[in-house]
């Protein structure tokens, strides 16, 4: 038994060392870090406007040819998306969004822009009229945003919201 252990010990150590090397520990290039920070900042601007219910500021973040895919509502274009956000802000005036910490992933799209993937949480007060017991109602949902950079300006061209 000792011979077998001595024979396999170097291989066991090599495998253990290899498994201990986490991909998250690999160095991130300056370009990848800059893209992550840029898209994170754009996400923050979009949802600062959303949380303030500034419809025009929200829509300024979208390209005119945006396609918004939602698992339970289907596909909408720019005009329908604007209409839907307007209705939401009127019917749920206290809705707020927050990005779930640590969920943001950003990947470059060559000669186009970036892919943003994450998990966000939306909360609003329950109806105090007696239909519910009050308090916050929250839900967390997955999303994919496709950002296009044109002339130094970032715009959302595709939005995929799912897991509702």
Image (cartoon, rainbow, N blue to C red):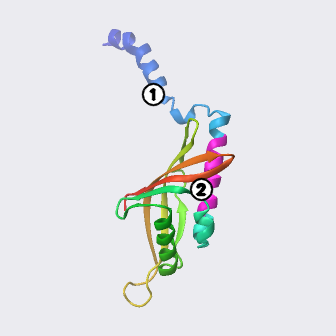
Q: Is residue 109 shown above or below 153?
A: above
Numbered disc in front, either 1 or 2: 2
Mark 1 to mark 2 CA distance (whole Å)? 34 Å
User: In terms of secondary structure, where does tag 1 sit?
Assistant: helix
The stretch in magenta equals 34-47
Q: Nearer the viewer, residue 99 or 48?
A: 48
Badge 1 vs badge 2, beta-carbon distance below 8 Å: no
Image quarter of residue 44: bottom right
**Residue at image coords 58%, 73%:** 53
Principal secondary structure, stretch drawn in magenta: helix
- The magenta stretch spans residue 135: no
Q: Is residue 108 shown above or below 157?
A: above
Q: Position of residue 68 (x, y in %)?
A: 45, 58
| Position of residue 26 in the picture relative to residue 137 (left or right) | right
On the image, numbered disc 2 is attached to which residue?
43
Classify the position of the N terminus by image quarter.
top left
Identify the mark nearer the N-term, 1 or 2. 1
Q: Position of residue 47 (x, y in %)?
A: 58, 63
- The magenta stretch spans residue 36: yes
On the image, numbered disc 1 is attached to which residue?
19
Q: Position of residue 89 (x, y in %)?
A: 52, 76
**Residue at image coords 51%, 55%:** 65
Q: Is residue 110 shown above or below 164?
A: above
User: In terms of secondary structure, where does tag 2 sit?
Assistant: helix
């Amino acid at each position: 038994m000792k011979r077998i252990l001595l024979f396999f010990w170097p291989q066991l150590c090599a495998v253990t060392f290899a498994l201990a090397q986490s991909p998250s520990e690999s160095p991130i290039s300056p370009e990848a870090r800059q893209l992550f920070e840029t898209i994170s900042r754009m996400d923050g601007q979009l949802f600062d406007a959303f949380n303030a219910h500034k419809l025009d500021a929200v829509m300024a973040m979208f390209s005119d040819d945006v396609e918004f895919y939602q698992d339970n509502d289907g596909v909408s274009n720019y005009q329908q998306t604007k209409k839907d956000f307007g209705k939401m802000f009127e019917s749920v005036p206290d809705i707020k969004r927050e990005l779930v910490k640590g969920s943001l992933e950003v990947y470059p799209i060559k000669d186009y822009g970036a892919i943003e993937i994450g998990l966000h949480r939306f909360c609003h007060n329950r109806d105090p009229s007696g239909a519910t017991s009050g308090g916050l109602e929250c839900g967390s949902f997955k999303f994919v945003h496709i950002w296009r950079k044109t002339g130094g300006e970032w715009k959302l061209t595709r939005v995929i919201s799912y897991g509702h």
